[in-house]
Amino acid sequence: PPFGSEVFVHHASLARNERERVEKRFLGASGAICFATTTLELGIDIGDIDEVGLLGPPVDVQSLLQRVGRGNRRQFDRTKVACFCDSPGHRARFEHMLNCARRGEIHAPKALFRPSVLVQQALSLLYQNRQRWVDAESLHERLPSWVAEGWSVADLDDLLHHLANNNWLYALSGRRFGPGERAERMFERGTMHSNIASSDGHDLEIVDAVTERVLGHFPVPPSSDAPRGALRKADVPSEIVLGGKRRQVQRVTGKQVRVTSGEPAAGAQFLGGSTPTVSFEHARSLARFLGVGESRVLVVRTPQTLYLGHFLGTAYGRLLLECLRTSVRGLSGAGNAFVVGLSTEQVPDLYFTEGQVLAAISKHRRALSMALGDGPMASYLPEGWWTSWLQQALDVPAFLSLTDTFRVEDAPPALMQTICGLAPNSL
């Protein structure tokens, strides 16, 4: 109540026709509510919305404006939004972002060139060529000038040889390369056209067993070792939650899972495909909003965890965590853009040498790379390229300058709950 059956769900795992169906019904309803992920941030026409509810703070000010902008935008000169918080930390983030929005401070992350794009472009160029070949010269010709300056033809030739050594390509005559087994599979699946991590990259098609309507997609279970296209019913959960309803699995045939619809799934949660990035500037702005000095690291001790409020943003926050894990034996923990939580009672040394930072980057390069939004094809790069890019993108000298100025002190009582509320969910 009061919406009756006019309760909708909109998320990326739903098939496109199902999402469009939801959009059309929501647009035409006189009174309805729609639960959605970021899929409705993209300017889809769903009419005027009386009120927007945000379940927890968005990642940044830009996302906040995209979501809030839908509330009453056609009828009034202001938008209407309800911000739902489950901790003092979330409340502080909401208040900070609303303050930034009023002041026009966006704090967007700086754009980085990701060399994994070169892998995607090489494969894309390969399949644009009717003769199915690519070489370093043709790839280099198509790079923007600001990218081409940093990557020579010889560099790209090394990349193509590396891809050939890993079965993505195979060598032809004249330093040309044709499609290898892995490239052919990626082309057949249609997953080679983007280097953006997406929750749409699923393998199983969910079909209504009664209507034959495609409902959405579901990932192949990571525990399954069955060959592609040979999944059995035992490889798939007996129940799948999709579109807010429980779906009972009836039959699995090839890449299709036939289901029947059940009752609404109370407490169902959306699982995102990637973690958005909070910029260094936005994290520092939150620190200033809370009255925390630029170089202060605030400590909160609980019986299980030691929290360090650092306000470094996603990339440097992850680098801080990995430096601590590398330099302190047996230390475990988790972190995000604002807080690191550690399994220790004593505050570890936060002074690092350049060698320690470089060792942390080398040892934990996958986690750090993901924190920078490296793209799904980053793992196909030569190892040296990957490490070198991380060192440049993370700006090791700048990070060392930051840690040199750290002043560690206990958090004031007024901020203790806020620091804990900003902590990563995994803690």
Image (tube, rainbow, N blue to C red):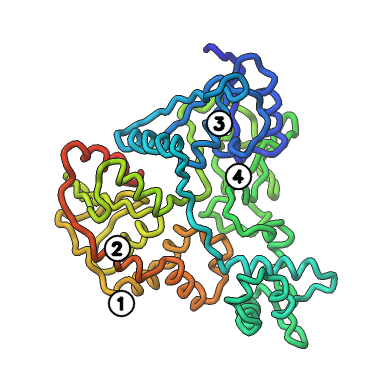
Label 4: which residue? 218
Q: Secondary structure at mark 2?
A: helix
Label 3 vs 1, first from the N-terminus: 3
| Disc nearest the viewer among 2 and 1 | 2
> Is label 1 in contact with label 4 (beta carbons under 8 Å)?
no
Task: Indicate which disc residue 130 carries.
Answer: none
| Position in image of residue 186 (x %, y %) | 69, 62
* 2 lies above or below 116: above
Q: How many marks?
A: 4
Task: Indicate the quadrant where residue 228 lies.
Answer: bottom right
Which kind of residue does numbered mark 1 sit on?
Gly
Tell me the crowding category of disc 4: few under 14, some 14 to 19, or many 20 or more residues within 10 angstroms, Cα based: many
Task: Indicate the quadrant where residue 14 lies.
Answer: top right
Instruction: Identify which residue is drawn at 30% across, 45% down.
Output: 288
Task: Indicate which disc residue 69 carries.
Answer: 3
Tell me the crowding category of disc 3: few under 14, some 14 to 19, or many 20 or more residues within 10 angstroms, Cα based: some
